[in-house]
Image: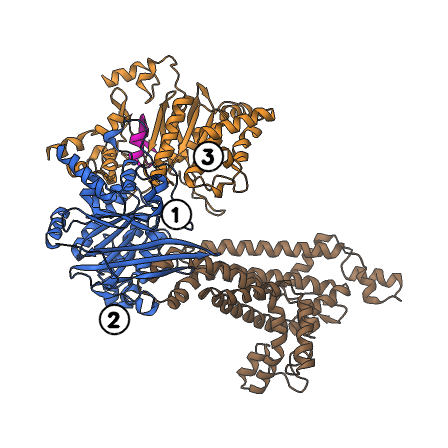
Amino acid sequence: MIRFMGVKLASGLAAIFGASILAFIFLRIVPGNPARLILGPLATQQAIDAQITTMGLREPIYAQYLNYMGGFLRGNWGFSYSAGQPVTTQVANRLPATVELALYAFLFAFIAAVVLAVLSTYRRRAIIDGTVRGLAIIGLSMPPFWFGILVLMLFFSYFGILPGPEGRLSPTTAAPDAVTHLYTVDALLHGQFATFLDAVWHLILPAITLGLAPFAFLVRLLRANLLDVSHEAFIVVVRSKGIGRLWAFARHALPNAFLPTLTAAGLILAQLLSGSVLVEKVFNWPGIGALVSDSIVRQDYAVVQAFILLSAFCFVVVNIIVDLLYHVIDPRVRVS
Amino acid sequence: MSDSKAIGARATRTSKVEHTAGDPPEAETVLSVRHIQTEFVTRGTVVRAVRDVSFDVKRAQKVGIVGESGSGKSALALSILGLIEPPGRVTGGSVWLNGREVPLRDDRRMGRVRGREIGLVFQDPMTALDPVQSIGDQVAEGIRRHQRRISRKAVRRMAVQLLQDVEIPMADHRLDDYPHQYSGGMRQRIMIAIALANSPDVLIADEPTTALDVITQAQIMDLLERLVAEHHTAVILITHNLGLVAEFCDVVQVMYAGRLVERSGVDDIFDGATHPYTEALLRSVPRSDHLESGPLPSISGAPPNLAALPRGCAFEPRCPIGHGREVCIQEQPMPILLGPPGAEMRVECHFASERYERARAEGETR
Amino acid sequence: MSDSYRQGLVGRTPGNTAGTDSPSPVPLLQVQDLVKAFPRRAGLFDRRAVSPPRAVDGVSFDVARGETFGLVGESGCGKSTIARCVLYLMRPDSGQVRFDGTDIGQVSTKDLRRLRQRMQMVFQDPFTTLDSRMSAYDIVAEPLLIHGVRGKDERDDRVRQILSLVGLIEDQFNRRPHEFSGGQRQRIGLARALVLNPELVILDEPVSALDVSIQAQVLNLLRDLQQRLGLTYLFIVHDLTIAEYFCDRLAVLYLGAVMELADRETLFREPLHPYTDALLSAVPVPDRRRQRRRQRVIIKGEVVPLSGPQPGCRFRPRCPVGRDRETCANVEPPLREVSPGHWVACHFAGELRNTTVIA
């Protein structure tokens, strides 16, 4: 077990290292002069040269890399020139919004996928199954930003039952005292029920929009697995003991069908945690995705670099958690 | 041992009439199957997997069901248990256990019968156990389902006892292991333990040793033989292996194209089958006592398409006796009872009586 | 006599004793001290590579032209691995495979290709080994294309001829595998193997997946083709009833080694190895009278793969004869010839038989 975790951690670190090098080199290669961007179009050539020197851009590229990584590990993620803030501050401001949205989107995708996959396979009714498969195809083929705009028009402009693109809370609601920085959690911790409801109310549309594609993906995977498992001999054997259909399904078919989807679910969560540019833009969501897209446009290296490293880290952590989960759930993987 | 039992059984039975659906089964009979019909409907075609199958099984009797793949033997087993899943459906007939009709079409009530009165040992031990649950949980599941008032500890004790009964070494430790930690033979022992957990009256064993090596097969069959004798359990052994039937069973039933074409005492059938199909089947198995007599007698052609069955006898196209005969092409043969009163012989062939008499005459002259 | 006889012929292997009298003294296939081990996958950080258990551990046998040689044994005995080594689909760790006198481990890739035309394999599952998108005709024509048989007409003649030979009729030629029954699919597999006119055909459980009545059809066909085309068969089979019916000589394998090797008559009438005895008595007999007469030796336990090289006899843990004997625990019994053509690897060959007859 310890050996196994060692291997996993080592390969995770290797992945992060690889990502950091790629990100570093890639962003050095793209055209554009950062010094001019910082100082503006009117700056003199001398000033620009001086700026390049202070930024360390004259040093050999490996030295630049080592400088950067050393700083990164010490908590100095660089300075965002476009915002005039350290990157750490910016990320700290933006990350919670993305994490909260990602978690709710994942929750929606996951629960909806399980429920619908079960519904479509349990009784094998052609109508339900057809509907679910149709939904999955729609979910996979619809561009999320377009779907976001569609639901906004429908539920905000037309019915007026859900909030418009105004961010995480209504303008009149104050953010709860920060503990986890996730508004729904913090609000509950402080017993601010109205704030909690407001936060959830604002999360509904973006979470569904963001979770739609993952939902469609998971529901297809789960449905196929469930169909396979329900034809397995052991289900017949369980039933031959006198166990009812529902219990056999819940206790035997579902866990076995669920196991192979765990890896996919982990990857989806990691992807969601890295933020979504378009969905955040549509809902005016103050998350990391919007920040990164702005930074790319402004050629603000420091932010993009930090983001790439952060998402690599996120993937590695989620993967390790998934592997651990397999060890807990699947006896076949357990090291004896 | 099986001989004396068969003789005893014969002596107590005097006459036998054709089954009708309402027949109250005889007292010593544990299981009666009456006119079971099972169909599978896919894309408009109806596959008639089981066609009007009726038979009785007495207490502690061992009945073999043989047939080739697609003959409906597995579908029959699942039909008796009420476990035919859509697109399949039991479209007719009834099953009686200890004189009471089994609620075949009521899944909830059927749950009280399955595992308690009828147990199932399924083929392929590799896929017959849930890979993510411990052996102990899977054995206990069946016990708890039917004996709700007993404590967790007692259930565990019973599970350990069951594993010891099927000769699993260190049963107490191995209870918490998972299926992948067991060999194929050991898993099949677990399957038997599960099937016998509530001492059912009838055990259906569907190809219980097909996936196993011969020595393991012999071990498993010995174990099964000992356990069913101890529990006085009746066994329906479904297999394609005629050797297994000869060694294990009292009575043989042969299925072809969904119908039970012949039922006979095991000695009768191996001395000389009456149905041409049974005869051909027996002759097509290589036997060391006639090795040099040229090619193996084989049955030409292939089993019929169950979605497009002929009007008459389904075996007619391949039959050495009836091929081309008008009566065989036109009429489905009805079961004919043969032999002395009480003999377990029943054959679906237009020429059954004729063939039976001739075989007996030949036997006497020999 | 046996030992001096053996020494007289240097390098003699358990081959066909009759072979010395036949016009062609070189057996078609000679397998000598074949060894093949499958190293367990050692991880990146796992350097505890112990010597892995051998799937095939020093197997030798000869197959004479025109005979059917059977390899029997339980799963894990190495019979399929031997077949793959014979075809050089898998490289043996050591040992020799000689085909018609040529050591196929020594020949060039080009020559190996040519040799392979003369050795073909028929697999167990006719469904998974036929491409479902190809017609029967194309499946059988493919080897001809691969091995460059020129001339469209020549190819066409050959394919049609061989398909008719295995018993398919013209209007079935263009059907695909799923339109055939199991027995017919096996016929196609056989046609594919025979189209290149091989001398040796390796039959890997060719009838195990088939129904009883279909088994008989295919076995008859195999016999018929052997006689007509002068084929030599290496027959891998777990069903002893079929082995007895079909093979001229057989080797009984246990955990990668030959336990006993003899002609059919001898092996089934007078088995000397306790394992052979156990195997034979475990086979259910579809004959009530013979069944009652016979003695059953049901050994306990299951095949447990060896974890590495061990002293003594590999069958000892389950052996009713040698379980508690010191010799069996310490000395691996060599395969010795106890009578001409009858080879046994047991220190106490025949003992079980003698005691049970007395008892």
Nearer to us in this view, C335 or B76: B76
Q: Amino acid at mark 1?
A: Pro
* Mark 2 or mark 1: whose residue is earlier in sequence: 2
Q: Please, what secondary structure does the residue beneath circle 1 have?
A: loop
Which residue is identified by label 1? B310
Q: Looking at the picture, do discs 2 and 1 lie on one chain?
A: yes
For the residues labelled 2 and 3, the Cα–Cα distance comes to 58 Å
Residue A208 percent coordinates (x, y)? 60, 72
* Chain letter for mark 3: C
What is the letter of the blue chain?
B
What is the letter of the brown chain?
A
Residue C196 percent coordinates (x, y)? 50, 26
Relative to residue A244, is residue B191 depicted above or below? above
Relative to residue C6, is residue B19 depicted above or below? below
Mark 2 or mark 1, whichever is nearer to me:
1
Magenta residues, as a range? C237-258
Question: What residue do we see at 83% from left, 63% from top?
Answer: A36
Which residue is identified by label 3? C189
Numbered tag placed on residue B151 in the rendering: 2
> In the figure, what tint was chain C given?
orange
For the residues labelled 2 and 1, the Cα–Cα distance comes to 57 Å
Q: Do the residues bearing badges 2 and 3 touch, measured as CB atoms within 8 Å? A: no
